[in-house]
Amino acid sequence: MSELKRIAVVGLGYVGLPLAVHLARHFSVIGLDIDSSRVEELQAGLDRTNEIDANSLSASTLELTDQVSGIENAEIFIVTVPTPVDQNNEPDLAAVRGASKLVGGVLKKGDIVVCESTVYPGVTEDVAGPELEAASGLTCGTDFFLGYSPERINPGDKEHTVDKITKVVAGQNTEVTQVLSEIYGRLTSGGIFVARDIRTAEAAKVIENTQRDINIAFINEVTTIFQKMDLSVYDVLEAAGTKWNFLNFAPGLVGGHCIGVDPFYLAHSATAHGLNPEIILAGRRINDGMGKYVANSVVEELAKKDKGVGAKILILGLTFKENVPDLRNSRVIDIVRELETQGFMVDVHDALADATEASEIFGISLMPTLDDAGGYDCVVGAVPHQPYVDFDDSRFESLLTGDGLVADVKGMWRSLELPDSIARWQL
């Protein structure tokens, strides 16, 4: 390890930045992001993802750059770029290809390129490898080498951070695997698991989130069943959760950069091998349909109050999960669009999301404040950000009309007593 001169982390988002900051505690590290504004913000001590605080940024020895030339002296390149799906839910590997070309332009003999992005088995060796070869003029496996160590970042999770979790590693050969084991072994106290090979490590990552997606889909499906029986799924889950091996999953919208995307990568692999991934895609269909289900349920409840087209609805929360500003692949937009399509007047507020980003991604103008908000026929609690969880009954009285409706998607107000005039609906 003493012979390694520098590690470069390519991509400084939710995954790359925490990784780079923690690696910089042990190694000489430079972080590259082609978004100049992102680099400028980080240099000023601002991380818009809220994963790294200003003090940690200022205290870090991490170097930052938006220039490819800034990483040309690195010997280990760790790629942490997004791997989304396209409009047909097919893997979009444009960022992986682009990062490979970029790194390939500065690649030297003996260098190692590690992919952390979630991909289907074979992408590191069959997609990134050839791109690196073409850009560098070097031969993969002889002049330079590949590795894979899947990211396991959970946005907003301050307990399972990159320096505490078990890291899976795999290299193109034994020597590369050993180097990666030493690097990540210095990084984390959670230990290292050496996968059999790169494709095995890629497969392990893609099923981690697919398994979670399927489990949530089951809970979402039984939620709709219990709704017909006038049962609260939360009451049912509390009872079932007393069994020692019951898996604790909750209903709701499934979005974000991983769980709502990764199953499509595995499904793509299955289809490419002539298989029909029935359970995987069924889970996706159920979870992707929850936004419309919630919207239609709200419409039905409002109809009981003789409120229909033109009624005013306030959506609280737009990010894909609670207490993070991450808007990527948020399914709250499905509720918004369905209600708008059916003729309702919809306003959206999010306590954490960036208004400019919300406009760029969804074309939504977020309410800047709730200070003067009121007169709504319905308040939909879509994302349990802490400021919303802290609402009391008087807050709803100020937001709603006298006979308004509270629609609680995540059960964050289950224990809150509401005035008799205010109706309640929840999953």
Image (spheres, rainbow, N blue to C red):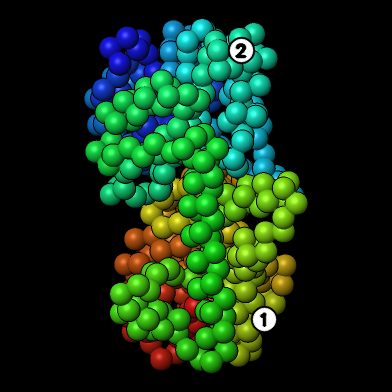
Q: What element carries label 2?
A: loop
Measuring 50% from the left and 66% from the top, which residue is drawn there? Answer: 215
Residue nearest the observer in this picture, 304 or 76 = 76
State left or right for residue 323 relative to residue 292. Answer: left
Q: Is residue 407 above or below residue 58?
A: below
Q: What element carries label 1?
A: loop
Circle number at residue 349? none
Can residue 82 be spotted in the picture? yes
State left or right for residue 411 relative to residue 425. Answer: left
Q: In this view, does 163 lie above or below 110?
A: below
Residue that label 2 marks: 139
Mark nearer the N terminus (2 vs 1) = 2
Marks 2 and 1, how far apart in space?
65 Å
Q: Is residue 182 above or below residue 307?
A: above
Measuring 63% from the left and 47% from the top, which residue is drawn there? Answer: 265
Residue that label 1 marks: 308
Check the picture and name the quadrant holding the N terminus.
top left
